[in-house]
Image (tube, rainbow, N blue to C red):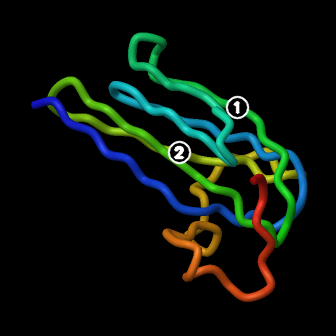
Amino acid sequence: MDGGARYSGFIIPPQTGRYKLTSYADDLLRVWIDGKPVFESKYQDKGQASGFVVLEKETAYPFLLEFRDGGAWGTYYLHWVPPGETEETYIPLESLYPTKPSLPKGIKFAGK
């Protein structure tokens, strides 16, 4: 069965610096932050991809993730490696927000 999902919202990093985002996807995963593509992960390319993005603490960046599956057992993961770290981890829920009204007070907006 073909299918997919699209998630959008905001990402607020816990610290300023260069983040590495890594993924695995069966079949396709695309990620944009602040309207700019970070990477595209395709199963044909062993499903793995990574990209770098510089983020500022207490700033909300528009975030978009698009997943597509061309058959059964579609799966993906998205991790990051924060500045100064070497191990990849899941992006903590405290850094992800579905809408602008849900953002904490005092947060700036990136981009446009």
The percent position of residue 100, horizontal first and vertical second, equals: 58, 74
Q: Which mark is residue 15?
A: none
Give the residue furthest to the top.
Answer: 44
**Is 37 displayed left or right of 27 in the figure?**
right
User: In front: 101, or 94?
Assistant: 101
Q: Residues within 10 Å of mark 1 (few under 14, many from 20)?
A: some
Query: Which element type, helix, strand or loop, lies under badge 2?
Result: strand
The percent position of residue 4, horizontal first and vertical second, equals: 27, 39
Question: Which quadrant of the figure has residue 108?
Answer: bottom right
Q: Residues within 10 Å of mark 2 (few under 14, many from 20)?
A: some
The percent position of residue 73, horizontal first and vertical second, equals: 20, 34
The percent position of residue 63, horizontal first and vertical second, equals: 59, 52
Question: Which amino acid, mark 2?
Answer: Leu
Image height check: is 28 above or below 9? above
User: In front: 92, or 4?
Assistant: 4
What residue do we see at 16% from left, 26% from top?
71
Quadrant of the rendering where the N terminus is positioned: top left
Distance from the alpha carbon under mark 1 to that under mark 2:
11 Å
Residue at the disc numbered 1 = 51
User: In front: 39, or 61?
Assistant: 61
Image height check: is 77 above or below 1? below
Give the residue furthest to the left.
Answer: 1
Question: Which amino acid, mark 1?
Answer: Gly
User: In front: 85, or 54?
Assistant: 54
- Upstream in the sequence, badge 1 or badge 2? 1
Query: Which element type, helix, strand or loop, lies under badge 1?
Result: strand
Whether pointer 1 and pointer 2 mark residues with C-beta atoms closer than 8 Å, the reply is no
Q: Which mark is residue 78?
A: 2
